Image (tube, helix red, strand yellow):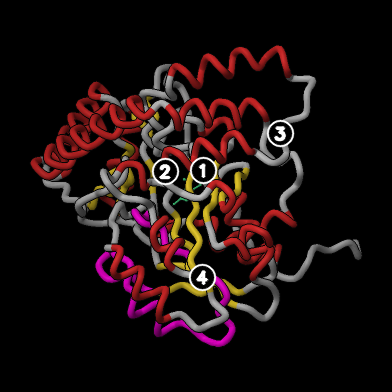
Amino acid sequence: MTKITPQPGILDIELYQGGASHVAGVANVVKLSSNENPFGPSDAAKDVYRKLAFEMHRYPSSDHTSLRAAIGAVHSVDPDRVICGAGSDEIIAFLCQAYAGPGTQVIHTEHGFAMYRISAMAAGATPVEVPERERVTDVDAILAACTDKTRLVFVANPNNPTGTMVGESELARLARGLPEQAMLVIDGAYAEFVEGYDGGAGLVDANENVVMTRTFSKIYGLGALRIGWGYGPRHVVDVLNRIRGPFNVSQPALAAAEAAVKDVAWTNKCRDDNTRLRAWLAEALAEHGVPSDTSTANFILARFASQDEAEACDGFLKSEGLIVRRVAGYKLPNCLRITVGDEASCRQVAHAVGKFMEQAR
Ligand SMILES: Cc1ncc(COP(=O)(O)O)c(C=O)c1O
């Protein structure tokens, strides 16, 4: 028996299940399982990425000044309090590493994103799951779950995989009510899909205990490059920078993200298309007898009558070359999460769900 063992709790971590991208025996699949932008990134981002093929022998910027300045200008935030990471996943991990640890608790909501739990456990902390109210974040339940051991509270707004969100006043109330040693992390991975929403930046500016995380993987279409960012009070960003590796983000990712964030016209086009197609898809599914909560993100959580029905529909969609996401691991066994694709994919998935429901009922 080996005496080489990991830190306590690490072996209790269940592996993250990503969205599938293949179906055995089907050549041309439509992937609607990872909330990716069906239109891809801005052309400006692709151009700069191509050019950087000739600079691959150079180390990247370690202070990310240029990208932070662009983020600051576009999102109206202080660039000195922005930190960039290899996806927002890395910012979540930094937060847990720096502020949680053995003997402390990290709160996440019932249907919250899996990485909160994984990163908390990786840091040796205890994840605490708090119920939602009908698939919506419940601020009172979170406040009731806080103890003197609570260090971090993760709330995704909009939430994944529910697609629902809560208002700024609710999050402000949560920040105000937290114990003094605890910090609220607002995960704004899907914030850009909500017109006029700042993702929680205003709450960061108004409070010493609020941090926001953001990503380039969703509306900006750069999931492959692994780049995200965080925005927080100066004291927090200073702490996170101490544990950040100097070259945590590659230069092609930094440069493509900068071009992407500056291409506001492309971002707006993607948001508008998503809003229109999301409404169409939700209505089409509802007409086929599959309801969903009003989504504020780039996916829909389709609710079926039972786990059996959801799984059978998933199997049928796969046989038609359509890959959506099962979310039983998020305690939603009777649901399937469907990314809002381009118009053809939306029509295809709605048609296939309709065909399934006709056979099933
Ligand atoms: C709520 C939420 N937060 C964070 C992430 C992580 O995004 P990334 O690490 O690609 O920036 C995701 C990805 O699916 C997400 O859904």
Tag 2 residue: 75
Estimate the spatial distance between the alpha carbons at disc 1 and disc 4, rounded to whole Å. 34 Å
Q: Residue at x 42, y 24 (%)?
A: 40
Q: Quadrant of residue 134?
A: bottom left
Number of other residues with Cα within 10 Å of mark 3, as a class: few under 14, some 14 to 19, many 20 or more: some
Estimate the spatial distance between the alpha carbons at disc 2 and disc 1, rounded to whole Å. 29 Å
Amino acid beneath label 1: Gly
Under 8 Å from ligand 1: the CB of mark 2?
no
The tag earlier along the polypeptide, 3 or 2, is 3
Q: Residue at x 42, y 46 (%)?
A: 76
On-image quarter of the N terminus: bottom right
Q: Is residue 134 magenta?
A: yes
Observer able to see residue 242? yes
Q: Position of residue 166 (x, y in %)?
A: 28, 62
Amino acid beneath label 2: His
Against 27, is 160 above or below?
below
Tag 4 residue: 208
Tag 3 residue: 61
The tag earlier along the polypeptide, 3 or 4, is 3
Number of other residues with Cα within 10 Å of mark 1, as a class: few under 14, some 14 to 19, many 20 or more: few
Amino acid beneath label 4: Glu
Observer able to see residue 312? no
Estimate the spatial distance between the alpha carbons at disc 2 and disc 4, rounded to whole Å. 19 Å
In the image, 177: left or right of 123?
left
Q: Of the residues tagged 2 and 1, which is closer to the observer?
A: 2
Estimate the spatial distance between the alpha carbons at disc 3 and disc 2, rounded to whole Å. 21 Å
Q: Are marks 1 and 4 in contact (CB under 8 Å)?
A: no
Q: What numbered label is drawn on residue 18?
A: 1
The tag earlier along the polypeptide, 2 or 1, is 1
Residue interval drawn in magenta: 131-159
Amino acid beneath label 3: Ser
